[in-house]
C-alpha cells in the first residue's frame, strides 16, 4: 500500500510509521508527506528518511475545498492509495473525505468516542478519569469519528499534568498506529455497519 501522510507539527507518529515501513515485512510504504505548516518538525523527519515532502499552506487558499484539491492532486501524483493523518490539524472537506472513504486513518489521543476535539488531556484530568488512551480510526466527515481499528488504554497517575499524560499516551500511539496500519494493509480489516471486524 502506498501511503500519504498528512501532518501539521512535530511528527512523532510519522516517525513511528516511517520506522515500521522500513521493516522488510511491512506491507506499506510512505510515498509523500504533506504538511500545511512549513516549519513542521515532521518535514525534517521525512526528509531525513528520504521521503518526498510537500507544503500546502491553507493560508494560500480561499476555501477549504481549494486547499483540499491541491492536497488531493499531490497525493494522486505521488501514487498514494491510502492516507494516514498524523497530527494533521485542519478539518477536511466532505469532498476530500469522500475521495478517501475507507482509505484514510487518523489517530486521536483519547479513547473515542470520549473526548473528541482539542485540549483532550486537560478535559480528561478535569473529569477525574482513571484511564485514558488513544484510538486509530477510519476518517469520516465528522471530526474524530469513524470505525475504530485499534485502541490502547493508558493509566492516569496521581499528580499527572496534561503534559505527563500526553507523553504517556504518545508512547502508546507509536505502538498502535503502525499496528493498525499493518492490519489494514494486510487486508484484515473489514467495515461492517460502521464498525470494524478484524481477522
Ligand atoms: C498526537 O497526540 C495525535 O494523537 C494527535 O496529534 C498529536 C500529534 O503528535 N492527533 P505528533 O506530531 O505525531 O508527534
Image (cartoon, rainbow, N blue to C red):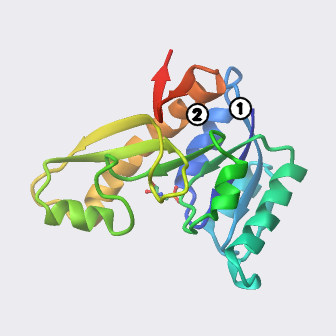
Q: Which mark is residue 12?
A: none
Question: Is 199 drawn above or below residue 59 in the view shown?
Answer: above
Q: Dividing the picture into quarters, in which one does residue 102 lie?
A: top right
Q: Does the numbered disc 2 mark a residue whose Cβ is under 8 Å from ligand 1?
A: no
Q: Secondary structure at mark 2?
A: helix
Q: Which mark is first along the chain, 1 or 2?
A: 1
Location of the N terminus (image quadrant):
top right
Q: Secondary structure at mark 1?
A: loop
Question: Is 27 drawn above or below residue 153 in the view shown?
Answer: above
One can see residue 44 in this view: no
Q: Nearer the viewer, residue 115 or 64?
A: 64
> What percent of the width, then of the height, locates residue 3?
73, 42
154 on left or right of 31:
left
One can see residue 4 in this view: yes
Q: Which mark is residue 181?
A: 2
* Count of number-bearing discs: 2
Q: Dividing the picture into quarters, in which one does residue 53 lie?
A: bottom right
Q: Of all residues shown, which one is farthest toward the top? A: 199
Q: Residue at x 80, y 44 (%)?
A: 80
> What percent of the width, then of the height, locates residue 125?
17, 62
Q: Residues within 10 Å of mark 2 (few under 14, many from 20)?
A: many
> What percent of the width, then of the height, locates residue 131?
19, 45
Q: Residue at x 9, y 55 (%)?
A: 158
Q: Which mark is residue 28?
A: 1
Q: Residue at x 39, y 64 (%)?
A: 117
Residues at marks 2 and 1 touching, judged by CB atoms closer than 8 Å: yes
Amino acid at each position: 500500500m502506498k501511503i500519504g501522510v498528512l501532518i501539521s507539527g512535530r511528527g512523532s507518529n510519522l516517525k513511528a510509521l516511517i520506522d515500521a515501513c522500513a521493516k522488510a515485512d511491512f506491507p506499506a510504504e510512505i510515498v509523500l508527506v504533506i504538511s500545511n505548516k512549513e516549519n513542521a518538525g515532521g518535514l525534517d523527519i521525512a526528509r531525513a528518511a528520504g521521503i518526498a515532502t510537500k507544503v500546502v499552506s491553507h493560508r494560500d487558499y480561499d476555501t477549504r475545498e481549494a486547499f483540499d484539491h491541491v492536497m488531493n492532486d499531490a497525493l494522486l501524483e505521488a501514487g498514494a492509495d491510502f492516507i494516514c493523518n498524523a497530527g494533521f490539524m485542519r478539518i477536511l472537506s466532505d469532498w476530500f473525505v469522500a475521495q478517501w472513504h475507507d482509505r484514510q486513518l487518523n489517530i486521536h489521543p483519547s479513547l473515542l468516542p470520549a473526548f473528541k476535539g482539542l485540549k483532550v488531556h486537560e478535559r480528561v484530568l478535569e473529569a477525574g478519569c482513571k484511564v485514558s488512551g488513544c484510538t486509530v480510526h477510519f476518517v469520516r466527515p465528522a471530526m474524530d469519528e469513524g470505525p475504530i481499528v485499534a485502541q490502547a488504554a493508558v493509566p492516569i497517575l496521581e499528580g499527572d499534568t496534561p503534559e505527563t499524560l500526553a507523553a504517556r499516551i504518545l508512547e502508546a500511539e507509536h505502538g498502535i498506529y503502525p499496528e493498525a496500519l499493518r492490519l489494514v494493509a494486510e487486508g484484515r480489516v473489514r467495515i461492517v455497519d460502521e464498525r470494524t471486524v478484524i481477522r
